[in-house]
């Protein structure tokens, strides 16, 4: 049987791992990305993002000529859309931006033929899959002859290559036949259960999962601010409360980042702001936590200045939105570092998972330990969890938002 060709549009944190996994599962894969450097890097068998095991998958797939990247779509049998879905921030309620999705669909319209699968994986507001169908229809595609569905990713950065295979997947088609056809495609490489539904339910399911997380993190973040006012160790409090058999409070942080949890709840709120009150409040709490964190750092700097007699140097530990990855999207740590620098504070930044950054002059952890008067723990990277780091932070001044020292 002839190998099927999968055209994956978008070679980012989801698209590239998906493409590499499919290439290892008897598919010919075409990767598409507008960034020429990304395309060149992939075609050299290398990767442009940090993700365990991904480099080996890509290297093997390219060497076997099962994965090739281009800057424009190529003919295929299955088309997967894995492009960003940001939001417009110039409104009271951030509005979903699906321009990249619709542009990607338009770019494949000339190749789609009867019997093909067209799958959206990008996190999207309810109704986006149906809008994709309209784009194809307007481009002259007989959408009754193809199978269109939504199947959101459910992976954790740092474990993507494992979770793409092991996690359950939700597939929602425009029609029952599309749901069935696309579900069967996922069953060729997913060992988890493939759950079938309709497109709108699948879209809402993805948003619900991340909104659930956001609401729970907001509870932890609000607790941390309440505890700070009362002189209570929030880490100890949560550990004690979690000993209750039906309580599982998450860990607080300096806010919430990442392209999913920090973004997806707004997609629900924008669709029905009058009803989505708790979801909106959680978003506001988590955004406020970042502002609150900046204020706490300023208080620590005033104290350090009085103690040392000079302008303190601040070491911001971590920029990523979560531990042990290089993904800085929507990172509250980046927002905090930017705010401090813009207000004239003397700041050095440590991020062991990236080599350089356009906005920050990165320093090594060792250099930061020598230079800084105030340490701000923003991300719980494994490199920060040594006895040396903890002892140095305690000896000087530590503002710990993620449990590096006190958690």
Image (cartoon, helix red, strand yellow):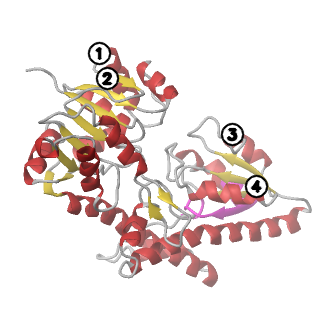
Per the model, the C-alpha gap separating discs 1 and 3 is: 38 Å
Q: Which residues are magenta?
A: 391-407
In the rendered image, is residue 362 in sight?
Answer: yes
Q: Nearer the viewer, mark 2 or mark 3?
A: 2
Q: Residue at x 87, y 59 (%)?
A: 311
Above or below, comparing residue 233 to residue 349 in the picture: below
**Disc 3 to disc 4: CB gap under 8 Å:** no
In the visual, does 227 lie left or right of 342?
Answer: left
Residue identifier under label 1: 64
Name the residue located 26 percent from the left edge and 51 percent from the top edge. Answer: 134
Residue 403 figure quarter: bottom right
Q: Residues within 10 Å of mark 4 (few under 14, many from 20)?
A: some
Which residue lies under the disc numbered 2?
67
Q: Residue at x 40, y 61 (%)?
A: 264
Tell me which corner region of the image, top left, top right, bottom left or bottom right, holds residue 337: bottom right
Asked if residue 151 can be seen in this view, the reply is: no
What residue is shown at x 36% (from left), y 69% (from top)?
Answer: 268
Q: Secondary structure at mark 2?
A: strand
Looking at marks 2 and 4 on the same chain, the residue that comes earlier in the sequence is marked by 2
In the rendering, which numbered label is found on residue 364?
3
Label 3 crowd (10 A; few <14 / some 14-19 / many >=20): few
Residue receiving disc 4: 341
Location of the N terminus by quadrant is: top left
Mark nearer the viewer, 1 or 3: 1
Real-space Cα separation, disc 4 to disc 1, in angstroms? 47 Å
Is residue 41 in the magenta section? no
Neighbour class for label 1 at 10 Å: few (<14), some, many (≥20)? few
Q: CA distance from mark 3 to mark 4?
A: 18 Å
Left/right of residue 380 with respect to residue 201 in the rendered view: right
Instruction: Give residue 396's position: percent from left, percent from top.
Output: 76, 59
């Amino acid at each position: 049987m002839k190998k099927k060709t999968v055209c994956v549009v978008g070679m980012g944190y989801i698209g590239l791992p998906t493409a590499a996994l499919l290439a290892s599962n008897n598919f010919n894969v075409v990767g598409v990305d507008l960034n020429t450097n990304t395309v060149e890097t992939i075609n050299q068998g290398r990767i442009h993002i940090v993700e365990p095991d991904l480099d080996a998958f890509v290297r093997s797939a390219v060497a076997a000529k099962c994965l090739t990247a281009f800057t424009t779509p190529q003919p295929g049998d299955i088309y997967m859309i894995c492009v960003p879905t940001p939001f417009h921030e110039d409104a009271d309620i951030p509005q979903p931006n699906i321009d990249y999705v619709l542009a990607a669909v338009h770019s494949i319209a000339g190749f789609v033929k009867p019997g093909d699968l067209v799958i959206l994986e990008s996190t999207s507001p309810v109704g986006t899959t149906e809008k994709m169908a309209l784009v194809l229809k307007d481009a002259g595609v007989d959408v009754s002859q193809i199978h269109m569905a939504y199947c959101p990713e459910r992976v954790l950065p740092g474990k993507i290559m494992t979770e793409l295979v092991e996690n359950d997947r939700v597939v929602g088609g425009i029609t029952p036949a599309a749901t069935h056809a696309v579900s069967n495609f996922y069953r060729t490489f997913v060992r988890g259960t493939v759950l079938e539904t309709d497109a709108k339910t699948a879209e809402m399911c993805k948003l619900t999962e991340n909104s659930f997380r956001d609401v729970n993190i907001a509870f932890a973040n609000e607790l941390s601010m309440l505890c700070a006012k009362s002189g209570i160790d929030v880490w100890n409090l949560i550990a004690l409360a979690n000993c209750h058999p039906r309580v599982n409070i998450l860990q607080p942080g300096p806010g919430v980042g990442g392209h999913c949890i920090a973004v997806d709840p707004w997609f629900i709120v924008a669709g029905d702001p009058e009803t989505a009150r708790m979801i909106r409040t959680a978003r506001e709490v988590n955004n406020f936590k970042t502002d609150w964190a900046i204020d706490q750092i300023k208080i620590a700097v005033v104290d350090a200045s009085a103690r040392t007699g000079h302008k303190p140097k601040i070491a911001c530990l971590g920029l990523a939105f979560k531990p042990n990855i290089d993904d800085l999207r929507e990172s509250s740590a980046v927002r905090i570092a930017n705010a401090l620098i813009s207000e004239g504070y003397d700041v050095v930044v440590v991020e062991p998972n990236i080599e350089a950054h356009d906005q920050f002059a990165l320093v090594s952890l060792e250099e930061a330990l020598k230079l800084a008067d105030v340490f701000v723990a923003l991300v719980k990277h494994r490199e920060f969890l040594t006895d040396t780091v903890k002892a140095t932070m305690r000896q000087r001044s530590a503002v710990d938002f993620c449990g590096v020292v006190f958690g």
